[in-house]
Image (cartoon, rainbow, N blue to C red):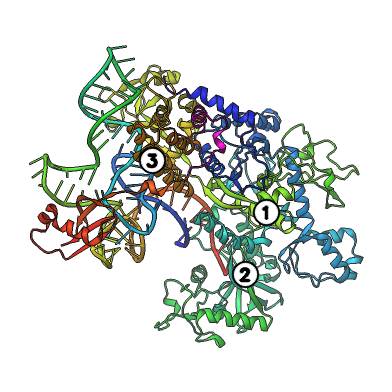
Amino acid sequence: MGYNFVETENKWQKFWAKNKTFKAAIDHSKPKYYVLDMFPYPSGSGLHVGHPLGYIASDIYARYKRLKGFNVLHPMGFDAYGLPAEQYAIQTGTHPSVTTQKNIVRYRKQLDKIGFSFDWDREVSTSDPFYYKWTQWTFLQLFRSWYNNKTNKAEPVTGLISEFEKNGNQNIDAFCSFGDEIFTASDWITMPEKQQQEVLINYRMAYLSETMVNWCPALGTVLANDEVKDGYSERGGHPVEKKMMKQWFLRITAYSQRLLDGLEKLDWPESLKEMQRNWIGRSEGAAVFFKTDATGDTLEVFTTRPDTLFGATFMVLAPEHELLEKITTSGHQKEVLDYVSWAKNRSERDRIADVKNITGVFTGAYSINPVNDQKIPIWVADYVLAGYGTGAIMAVPGHDSRDFAFARHFNLPILQVVTREDEVPEDPKHWDDSFDAKDGKMINSGFINGLEVKDAIMAITKKLEEEGKGFGSINYRLRDAIFSRQRYWGEPFPIYYKNGMPYPMSESDLPLELPEVDKYLPTESGEPPLARAKNWKTKDGYSIETNTMPGFAGSSGYYLRYMDPTNDKAYFSKEANEYWRNVDLYIGGDEHSVGHLIYSRFWNKFLYDIGLACEGEPFRKLINQGKIQGRSSFVYRIKGTNKFVSYNLRNSYETARQHVDINLVDNDVLDIQAFRNWQPDLADAEFILEEGKYVCGWEIEKMSKSKHNVQNPDELIKQYGADTLRLYEMFLGPLEYHKPWDTKGIEGVFRFIKKLWKLYHDNQNRFYVSDDDPDEKELKVIHRTIKRVEEDINRFSFNTVVSTLMICVNDLAELKCHKRSVLETLAVLVSSYAPHIAEELWQLLGHNESITYATFPVYNEQYLKEDSIKYPVSFNGKVRFTLELPADMTISDIEKIVLADKQTQKRLQGKEPRKVIIVPKRIINIVV
RNA sequence: GCGGAUGUGGCGGAAUUGGUAGACGCGCUAGACUUAGGAUCUAGUGCCGCAAGGCGUGGGGGUUCGAGUCCCUUCAUCCGCACCA
């Protein structure tokens, strides 16, 4: 019989591995192209058809670029640290590295079967000490760096120290978690070492700080917000409490503006860039100082609307605000304390669900509005967030809807200070809502009366600055990244403690390998698992940090390591970095839109600052591949029986819908015998059929084991081959779309592969090509195909390439074309999509080299010329008939012929056309 | 609530700058060859209609000789953020 895909695919996969066909090496004679996939976490359940979608697309593009003469870097590796392996270790005692290694081997096998052109010599694995040495190394550089606002980059702390020794910190403008304490050189020099370290840690790019975390005592660990449901852990359902804890942070906020600006030049989906912009959350406004009436403290607020300062009728502090306790008057102490403890104990969920519920308490204190010396009351309310801005606001109820609601609820004064064009100001008492829009003129606002909002903002900011009562300010929502986890399975920190202060270990001590522990659980006293390790101390006996790094540590710089993965002297060589530079095409899921993609950009910018990375952005073009959804099948059990009713009859009964394994269903018809064998309790199941069949219902859902709708690639490859799988995954639709998996459609692509094979063979399946020159029709078919394939690949429209290739094969089959030159071209066009069959055909055509490094054909416009055009003739825009005319006919000749045509005459019925529009080579439209 | 995306046959989707809507494939219908087929081949297949013809890209409106494509408006679904000062 025809094409033997099993044998052929095996043969070429072996060939590629043996000959290292896809090995990439620096070659200055060729332009480079770096194609990267987001590397996978090797989970225990292996790959399903959704996982390789992006890898197939990137592989096609990588292979295409090789054909176009590029030196392509296309590596793959494993994001090998992760919770599931640790969880499994806790349950079974199996070391996570054992589990992870096993899963990696399985993944590798599955990936190899799909025929990817990865350079496996560059494989990295984040949990491999040879790799994580550089993750730890980068952390050390972060620890030893500070952010200089004057040069707008990260610099070595050593430079900072010598400046302290000379001039103290008065000339330093740093991005730091330090107040405005000024010290002199002699202050610095006389400081005890411990105190110096306490000062320095506030400047470091990697620093320790207290923060409120979700602490789960039962699990002995800190949980992310999404791991907490209703105040209980999602896993295990243990109670979770808020707790202050020391954590490592990375000073990503120093890069807020650069991370924002960098987006402009990136070829990323607009929606993704927008998500990052929102995440960074830049807002322009002003910081304004309010002095408290009684205690004289300064309360700093951030506002985007300094123009409305005259309309500020009260202030609100977050329950966590540090001055709250101090300013609260004795008469209000109890009330405020009660409110604060209530607010602090509210779970995340309560706060979100309770949006409509307005709460707050008066502190008894007053502050002075800096522009008009008005005394305004200070309240505490949890609608003001501690983590945003300064945790305090000036409330302008006339022009902010939340302040408005609050003022209404507590009967606080509302003052209008902005008025719309043509509006007669009326007492805000009668308003239904505040007027938040940023257009209009100022009223009731002293020296800025009559100004437009925009001008008023500038004027008042200037005045505040002159009088030292505030300054123009930009605020970001982005927060520093918490970088420590109380887990076992992660990179250890190369940090030890002396006198309670953290010190960096030396580079020569790296990698600091994960120690063995007796159990993968926290200690009885709630310390992280690493505290169980014996002798977790430096040579000098100092204890080593017991936290480990989070998942994003290892994935933040892996694309750089791929450039030079075997280097044991450096993260990567300058030569490799300057050749490969950054990723030209990055493909992965949109679940990493704000996490991985923002941390990576930060990591890269830091390495750029310290002179390591030569590009400011890691990923030039990015595509989010869509998810492949499952298509679940359902049967309908009549309640309380073991009887199942077919889909269209189900409404006559009380039924319960249940998932059925998609392997038992063909074209929505249930295989009743297989169903009975599926589970023991179904052995005696009865059925109510329609037209002799049991028809199943279906729905598009997430692909998951529990829904019995998982499609495994291995089975499909066994049945149809990898080439067919690759083509079909692309044929499913645009790469970016979410689309349901439908196994039925794969048959069409399988037929295409068989038809392709037949073009190169006679009826007896003997290889057959002729050396005759192709005729005009054959040339037209193949050149049209070259053109379309190239255009579509260049706009990453992988699905339309498949249909173009199908059309080409159909056309050539109809022409009974066996001409060598045409078929050689076709093999190259097909090779990036279906590499195995293409290699085989290429070899049959007499080539000894792999088709990988063939040359992508160039189409010749001359063969595409049409002698005549079939013009659609429309009347008032509706097409009525077509008319075949010579391609080079002039407009006036076309008009004459069209108007003389019998069918036109019939349509016009003797009337004169109002207008005749002729678009050469496109359309004729007659307006009647 | 804010931000983003998507709506085209029974299904996945095509239509690159406004120019024959539904390419390609699945499914379906009929037929051929077969002992048989879930193999292969041929023809058909947007909807309504016997036909002539009419209607069709979520709905409504507009610009245009001509709109899936441009503008306004509205609805639905999905995703992200969610008291952000």
Residue closest to the far left: A910
Residue closest to the far front: A772
Q: Quadrant of the C terminus of chain A?
A: bottom left
Magenta segment includes A801: no
Mark 2 to mark 1 CA distance (whole Å): 24 Å
Amino acid type assigned to the residue bearing label 2 in the image: Ile
Amino acid type assigned to the residue bearing label 3 in the image: Leu
* Residue under label 2: A474
Chain letter of the residue beneath label 2 in the structure image: A
Q: How many marks?
A: 3
Tell me residue A56's x, y (percent): 52, 38
Out of A510 and A894, give the one closest to the viewer. A894
Q: Residue at x 40, y 34 (%)?
A: A742
Q: In which quarter of the image is the N terminus of chain A?
A: top left
* Residue under label 3: A779
Q: Quadrant of residue A847?
A: top right
Sequence order check, earlier mark of 2 and 1: 2
Magenta span covers which residues? A834-857
Tell me residue A424's x, y (percent): 40, 84
Looking at the rendered structure, the secondary structure element under dot 2 is strand
Looking at the rendered structure, the secondary structure element under dot 3 is helix
Chain letter of the residue beneath label 1 in the structure image: A
Out of A165 and B34, give the one closest to the viewer. B34
Sequence order check, earlier mark of 2 and 3: 2
